[in-house]
Image (cartoon, rainbow, N blue to C red):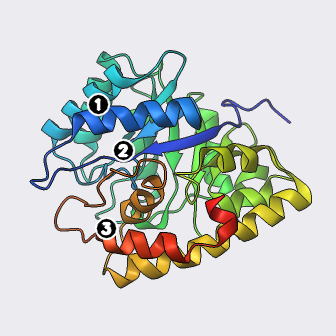
Amino acid sequence: MPPKRYPSVLLATCSIPWTTQYAFDAPLFTKSVKSLAAEMTPHIYLFGTAGEGYAVTDRQFEEIVTTFRDALPPDTVPMIGVISLSLGTIVERIRFSRELGFRDFQISFPSWGALTDAEVDRFFAATCGAFPDCRFLHYNLPRTKKLLTGDDYARIAARHSNLVAIKMGGLDTSPLADVLEKAPELQCFFVELGYAAMRDQYECGYIAAMAGGKPVWAREFHAARGERLAAMLDDAKAAREVLIKHVHAAGAHMDGAYDKMNLKLLEPTFPLRLLPPSSAPEDEAFEQFVTELPPTWLN
């Protein structure tokens, strides 16, 4: 098996706090970034789907990325997510972030319509191909309307040595082994369900989703194997059912609504609001969420 291009680390996402006027709360963001880096993992990323990377304006993107750079403690390994319907905007945001010193990026396809195979190749040429001194993680998700297979990644990885990793989520773990087997040089990152399903058979990385506000649990889950890993997954599934119940009751459905509820366990002052027009739970929903969580999840 070829060596992986990226280590099998624990990744954590940074959420964005918005004031009641939907202005960026830079001091609280800085505090939360430092807490995640110190207590959970030095491998943190900004502007995944949970981080509302799809919703920010160019001005907000530049302000938040600059604040992120200034907030990072020494020895962190930061990653910038770039999401847009415009490939031109994606390239401009990579270039801006690169000029600030960032070299790791999380990218996903423009999602207005499903890309053809030829368009997929053009996308990676414009990102991985145009920035050879940077490393790229591709977020392979149904929202983009184009899911890549193991054969796709094998072809693209042969063409771009700086495509180093893949992120995949969802409840269906059946496509994961295909990617792990056919593109073995790429590191694969999964949330709790996928990680527990794959980790005993394959090297893979873990993205703290349900555990976004539980650093000790996340680090233990990342290190767990066998029966311990399965038992911890059962705890996460039970907590997930409670989370889904209260997020859906609030009429919310975007990724950030779930992640901010979880992060609030670590940062109690963190606001739950999302940028309009997205709905978000109120603080009362969070209090009910905490009340109904299994006792094992609150320890």
Residue beneath label 1, please?
65
Going 90% across and 57% down the picture, which residue do you hit? 226
Q: CA distance from mark 2 to mark 3?
A: 23 Å
* Front position in the image: 182 or 242: 242
Up the image or down, 265 lies above or below 102; here it is below
Label 2 sits on residue: 47
The disc, 2 or 3, on the residue closer to the chain's N-terminal end is 2
Amino acid carrying mark 3 in the image: Asp
Q: Residues within 10 Å of mark 3 (few under 14, many from 20)?
A: some
Q: Quadrant of the C terminus?
A: bottom right
Residue that label 3 marks: 283
C-alpha span from label 2 to label 1:
9 Å
Label 2–label 1 contact, CB within 8 A: yes
| Kind of residue at disc 2 | Phe
**Residue positioned most to the left:** 21
**Horizontally, is 97 left or right of 5 in the view?**
left
> Which amino acid does the dot numbered 1 rest on?
Val
Q: Which quadrant of the view contains residue 169?
A: bottom right
The quarter holding residue 231 reads: bottom right
In the picture shown, does residue 250 fall above or below 201?
Answer: below
In x, y percent, where is residue 234?
Answer: 74, 70
At 37% from the left and 84% from the top, the residue drawn is: 249
Task: Classify mark 3: helix, strand or loop.
Answer: helix
Please provide percent x and percent y for residue 292. 54, 77
Measuring 47% from the left and 67% from the top, which residue is drawn there? 142
